[in-house]
Image (cartoon, rainbow, N blue to C red):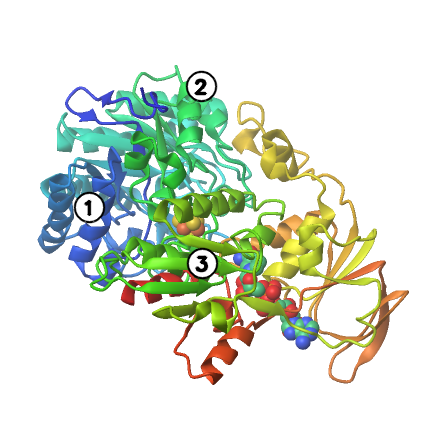
């Protein structure tokens, strides 16, 4: 008997059956734009082998004006069909099913030729769209229908029509972006004419035995978004027009409410999808922040949806479904919803990967093959770099001993998990615990490894991490000055007024930790209140009239940096705004362009600019040092001086801008070659 009866139950669609209730949601990985379709095929075939019932590709533009950016992948010509066929053939050979998403970006298209219902620029693009006339609208519909027929010709099992997240179709639905007075604007019947017409004509063109998913925005999270009555009306009309399945979209891209970041509670929007259950008779898929089989099972068991969509969890672990089915859920590499190697890459024009799985989108290039010679390998440091090196080496058949001076593995991940909104790190450390035991890695914890301990190993990998940088501020040795490590470990007493020196990722995390006494991420009603999310049946678009209502901050915090730029500018591209907005809601003062003059019992004395003008006291009971990191190279230097050959990885190698993404990537790649 499986632990996941709902998740693993087949879904009969009449003309075809899905083998379970898991859909891999659409993700733009950038793979198609490499032009290497074998690589694209390897990505999807790997996930098909892992047991997911149906995958949806990244958004494919139906025409150049609808591309998310100039040159975005699409399905415009016969040559494109041949490329896509490489993917569908490999997926089918692997026992999977795949649907192609048709994505018309409308005014979100990052190019001067973008088109939309009305000429209203979006806040997230510099390009004002051109308003379409009747012929222009007809062309867009016809191009979308042609893309669907080409998808069928290319061997796809279906298409997903992207109708949510504020893209083209969604832009017709709401008065926020549709000011038309013709038959495509005005009344809701007119505004929903476009999606219904598209669905009707797509179905007529592709026949009855082809999956057509419609991704419907169930809560827009923007001003003047759809009402719930409108959502239901559209869902019914889309069903009648021939959709096979309805998928859930949450929030427009321009919404100022996080919808998938790690601080969003798990399954935070399943209740929205649940409201639609019973309104239509076709299957409904729910989505957003579902990342474990237990959560997915619970969502289905509670009747929130007929299927679940997970996207990033399949970057983290292509074998998610197979492991769940085999009773090995603890071995699923968990997606921590950090966006660091997936969406942040996409939005920087880089190929996607995954922080916890560097092989994602690099399946053909980073291979973990059995070692030809079995070696003894010592890894010193059980943080992300050391853990990934140890596990990869062990997977290849090496005998690995993992040393750490702490009595537990995880390194700085154990600090990250203390931060409100970063609870996913608990699961990541648990996963590493499971895998270290399963891989048979010998643990030598709670001891400082010496050169004598390391004599006789074939390979030595130094992953000793980082040391906090000493900012050398006069008075920093006073009793009111503490390091971020002690704060996050709970080993420091922190007063009511705090100054934080350094506004990198850790300064922001420490500020969050100090202003929050319970994490809304652990309690959905609190999180919805914090960000001002309401029931779309009560408030249009799901935006509460009173706006965000966070709990009062539990301390008065000032966050400082020497650079004169906006604080948090270098945080993650897709998550930095959330960290900044979160701290602003808690009245954290953010001050840049400062010099640290001295610390005394009254607090932190600063001045401004090169001429050290405008001296000021930041009155504080406690000053927390978050001034960056330096490599901890003591052991490495000792061994190198003794003529030992060592590999140095992670923060011990380069501390500047170190994060878990680089550490895990470096550890995995090194161990793949030993
Ligand atoms: P960091 O990002 O390098 O920031 C260090 C901070 O210290 C900066 O604000 C810097 O600003 C300041 N600083 C540097 N030298 C200083 C000095 N001599 N005196 C006083 N201040 C000084 O390092 P971090 O915050 O320790 O984070 C370490 C790594 O972990 C980062 O790469 C970060 O990306 C990663 N991390 C990421 C997240 C995330 O949310 N993605 C969270 C936590 C950590 P000024 O030089 O302008 O003063
Ligand atoms: Fe998940 Fe982070 Fe990997 Fe993206 S990079 S898939 S958010 S763990």
Q: Nearer the viewer, residue 539 or 88?
A: 88
Would you name the residue on which mark 3 appears?
Answer: 402
Q: Nearer the viewer, residue 180 or 382?
A: 382
Would you name the residue on which mark 1 appears?
Answer: 45
Q: Residue at x 50, y 27 (%)?
A: 227
Tell me the distance, in whole angstroms, between the alpha carbons under discs 2 and 3.
43 Å
Q: Say the numbered circle drawn on residue 302.
A: 2
Residue labelled 3 has its Cβ within 8 Å of some atom of ligand 1: no
Residue 183 in sight here? no
Work out whether mark 3 precedes mark 1 in sequence or the reverse, and give the earlier one.
1
Which of the image's four quarters has the N terminus? top left
Residue labelled 1 has its Cβ within 8 Å of some atom of ligand 2: no
Work out whether mark 2 precedes mark 3 in sequence or the reverse, and give the earlier one.
2
Q: Examine the image and state in which quarter residue 57 appears.
A: top left
Work out whether mark 2 precedes mark 1 in sequence or the reverse, and give the earlier one.
1
Which structural element holds mark 3?
strand
Relative vertical location of residue 196 with respect to residue 255 in this rendering, above or below? above
Quadrant of ligand 1: it is: bottom right
State the image coordinates of residue 60 (x, y, percent, origin top left): 25, 48
| Dot 1 alpha-carbon crowd within 10 angstroms: few under 14, some 14 to 19, many 20 or more | many
Which structural element holds mark 1?
helix
Image marks 2 and 1: residues in contact by CB distance under 8 Å = no
Relative vertical location of residue 269 with respect to residue 93 in this rendering, above or below? above
Which structural element holds mark 2?
loop
Q: Examine the image and state in which quarter residue 358 appears.
A: bottom left
């Amino acid at each position: 008997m499986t632990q996941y009866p709902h998740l693993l139950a087949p879904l009969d669609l009449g003309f075809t059956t899905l083998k379970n209730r898991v859909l891999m949601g659409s993700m733009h990985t950038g793979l198609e734009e490499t032009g290497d379709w074998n690589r694209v095929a390897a990505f999807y075939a790997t996930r098909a082998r892992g047991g997911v019932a149906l995958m949806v590709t990244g958004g494919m533009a139906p025409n150049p004006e609808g591309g998310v950016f100039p040159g975005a992948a699409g399905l415009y010509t016969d040559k494109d069909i041949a490329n896509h066929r490489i993917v569908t053939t490999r997926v089918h050979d692997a026992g999977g099913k795949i649907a192609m998403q048709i994505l018309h970006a409308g005014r979100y298209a990052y190019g001067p030729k973008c088109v939309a219902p009305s000429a209203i620029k979006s806040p997230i693009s510099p390009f004002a769209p051109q308003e379409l006339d009747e012929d222009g609208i007809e062309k867009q519909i016809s191009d979308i229908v042609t893309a669907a027929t080409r998808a069928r010709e290319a061997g796809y099992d279906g298409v997903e029509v992207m109708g949510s997240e504020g893209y083209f179709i969604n832009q017709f639905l709401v008065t926020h972006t549709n000011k038309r007075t013709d038959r495509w604007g005005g009344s809701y019947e007119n505004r929903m004419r476009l999606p219904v017409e598209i669905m009707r004509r797509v179905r007529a063109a592709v026949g009855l035995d082809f999956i057509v998913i419609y991704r419907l925005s169930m809560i827009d999270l923007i001003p003047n978004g759809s009402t719930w009555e409108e959502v239901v009306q559209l869902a019914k009309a889309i069903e009648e027009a021939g959709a096979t399945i309805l998928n859930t979209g949450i929030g427009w891209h321009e919404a100022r409410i996080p919808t998938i970041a790690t601080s969003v509670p798990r399954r935070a929007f399943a209740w929205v999808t649940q409201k639609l259950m019973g309104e239509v008779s076709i299957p409904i898929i729910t989505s957003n922040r579902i990342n474990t089989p237990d959560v997915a099972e619970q969502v289905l068991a509670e009747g929130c949806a007929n299927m679940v969509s997970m996207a990033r969890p399949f970057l983290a672990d292509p074998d998610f479904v197979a492991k769940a089915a085999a009773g090995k859920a603890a071995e699923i590499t968990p997606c921590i919803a950090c966006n660091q190697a997936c969406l942040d890459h996409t939005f920087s024009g880089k190929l996607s990967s995954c922080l916890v799985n560097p092989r994602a989108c690099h399946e053909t290039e980073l291979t973990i093959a059995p070692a030809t010679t079995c070696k003894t390998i010592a890894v010193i440091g059980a943080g992300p770099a050391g853990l990934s090196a140890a596990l990869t080496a062990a997977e290849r058949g090496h005998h690995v001993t993992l040393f750490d001076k702490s009595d537990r593995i995880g390194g700085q991940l154990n600090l990250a998990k203390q931060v409100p909104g970063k609870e996913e790190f608990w699961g990541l450390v648990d996963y590493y615990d499971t895998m270290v035991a399963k891989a048979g890695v010998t643990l030598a914890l709670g001891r400082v490894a010496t050169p004598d301990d390391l004599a006789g190993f074939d390979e030595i990998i130094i992953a000793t991490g980082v040391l906090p940088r000493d900012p050398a501020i006069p008075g920093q040795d006073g009793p009111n000055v503490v390091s971020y490590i002690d704060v996050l470990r709970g080993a420091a007493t922190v007063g009511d007024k705090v100054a934080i020196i350094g506004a990198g990722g850790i300064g922001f995390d420490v500020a969050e930790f100090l202003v929050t006494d319970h994490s809304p991420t652990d309690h959905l009603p609190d999180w919805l209140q914090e960000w001002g999310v309401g029931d779309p049946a009560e408030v249009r678009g799901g935006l509460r009239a009173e706006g965000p209502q966070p709990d009062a901050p539990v301390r008065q915090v000032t966050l400082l940096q020497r650079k004169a730029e906006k604080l948090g500018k270098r945080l993650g591209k897709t998550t930095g705004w959330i960290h900044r907005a979160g701290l602003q809601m808690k009245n954290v003062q953010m001050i840049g362009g400062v010099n640290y003059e001295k610390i005394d019992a009254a607090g932190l004395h600063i001045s401004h600019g090169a001429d050290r003008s405008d001296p000021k006291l930041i009155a504080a009971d406690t000053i927390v040092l978050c001034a960056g990191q330096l490599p901890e190279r003591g052991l490495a230097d000792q061994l190198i001086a003794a003529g030992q050959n060592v590999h140095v990885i992670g923060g011990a190698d380069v501390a500047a801008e170190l994060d878990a993404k680089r550490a895990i990537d470096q550890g995995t790649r090194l161990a793949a070659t030993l």
